[in-house]
Image (cartoon, rainbow, N blue to C red):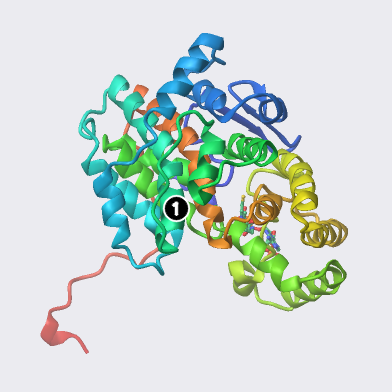
Amino acid sequence: MAVDFKAGLEDVVAANSAICDVDGKAGRLRYRGYDIGDLAERASYEEVTYLLWFGELPGRDTLQQFSRSLAGQREAPPPVLDAMQRFPHTAHPLEALRSAVSLHAMYDPDVHDNGREANLRKSARLTAQMATLVAAWRRIREGKSPVVPDPALSHAADFLYMMTGQPPDPVSAEAMDAVLVLHAEHELNASTFVARVAVATVSDLHSAVVAALGTLKGPRHGGANEDVLAMIEEIGPPERAEPYIRARLEARARMSQADRADPRNRIPGWGHRVYKVDDPRAARLRAIGRRLAERAGVLPLFETAETVYRVMKAETDLPVNVDFYSAVIYRALGIPIDLCTSIFAVARIAGWCAHMMEQYGDNRLIRPRAHYTGVEPRPFVPLEARP
Ligand SMILES: CC(C)(COP(=O)(O)OP(=O)(O)OC[C@H]1O[C@@H](n2cnc3c(N)ncnc32)[C@H](O)[C@@H]1OP(=O)(O)O)[C@@H](O)C(=O)NCCC(=O)NCCS
């Protein structure tokens, strides 16, 4: 077999897709042809979800209908919420979410129907309820009751409301909406690829989302935003950021390649497989982060992040990625550190569903090959003859 192997499938094209275009050299990101900056500033998460699933921005009436339909489906099945009450309170929020989505499948009337209409219905339920499940877990583990969703609120505002029990102020709701739009989709990232591989076997949407959640969890993917906040808190005041980053970079320079590859020895929120320049989402998140940090009285946290940014730019040629400033936003919104990756999932479910439906629409089993590097063929050795 001819060997044309790229470690980590770097730059390998593995699907045709009309959903999202990432230009890593120019630092551009478009959903269905629309620039991410325009969408984050001018479109709601509901609008963007419609765009991702149906290919066009909805008109006024269609958007109203679509938003109402999503809002009307936000209540999670009671047996799933009951089961969550019995999860150990020490469970990481993403583990609780992964298990809740797996249970959710058993209460979904369309679980075994993989037709386009059934997949749209399941996508709507999953997208509407992901936020409900994440918010419910935050409350359950604190010994509080889940808050019943309020269909009069936008998806982003209701998510904040279900977490705290207080209707959010407009600035916080608007910030959360932009965060959800910015995280809704990103081409063949690891979790989306896994979701497409799962449905390509003609498995069901829920199983694929469980696989995607498990993939999102890792520190090289969605888990990085939690590490960013941990790092910024470890640094403390802004004046400590420069010596901290310099010391970490210097320590890295003395490490072996294997040690440098360990996520604990990398600077979270930096580096990207596709972007060679700063991730365009980071600029938006930076602006939102500054505004929210000022309002919440945690400006030093933002300034620490800014100093890290400045030092990393001076000392490395790595691009900043989406996880760097999102961590500051979640802290300014009073969201616990370990919920960061679950919020990523609340947003990304829209993109996962778009990709899964696209895969079902033109499906072929995804089954690559491995280049065999093991021992040459050899005769079997009976047990009694082995040393
Ligand atoms: C995102 C990521 C996994 C991409 O990995 P990748 O495309 O396989 O890139 P590589 O691991 O081949 O890295 C290329 C070089 O850049 C360096 N590099 C990449 N990201 C780095 C980081 N965050 N901090 C320090 N150095 C980094 C690597 O060490 C490597 O150089 P080396 O071989 O001299 O050690 C990687 O950049 C990373 O681990 N980032 C931190 C975690 C993160 O923020 N993830 C969220 C992504 S949206």
Q: Position of residue 17 (x, y in %)?
A: 50, 26
How would you rate the neighbour count of disc 1 (Cα within 10 Å): few for under 14, some for 14-19, many for 20 or more? many
Question: Vertical placement of 166 versus 251: above or below?
Answer: above
Q: Mark 1 belongs to which amino acid? A: Thr
Q: Position of residue 80 (x, y in %)?
A: 28, 49
Which residue appears farthest toward the front when viewing the image?
166
Q: Residue at x 71, y 51 (%)?
A: 325
**To which residue does mark 1 refer?**
215
Q: Residue at x 57, y 60 (%)?
A: 336
- Front residue of 66 and 310: 66
Q: Is residue 367 left or right of residue 92?
A: left
Of the 4 image quadrants, the one containing the C terminus is bottom left
- Residue 241 seen: yes
- Front residue of 271 and 351: 351
Helix, strand or loop status at disc 1: helix
Q: Residue at x 22, y 40 (%)?
A: 107
Question: Vertical placement of 94 versus 160: above or below?
Answer: below
Q: Is residue 227 left or right of residue 71?
A: right
- Front residue of 287 and 34: 287
Q: Is residue 151 left or right of residue 278?
A: left
Which quadrant of the view contains residue 224? bottom right
Q: Position of residue 207 (x, y in %)?
A: 30, 44
- Front residue of 353 and 18: 353
- Residue 59 seen: no
Name the quarter showing ligand 1.
bottom right
Which quadrant of the view contains residue 23? top right
Q: Residue at x 15, y 86 (%)?
A: 385
Q: Position of residue 15 (x, y in %)?
A: 47, 31
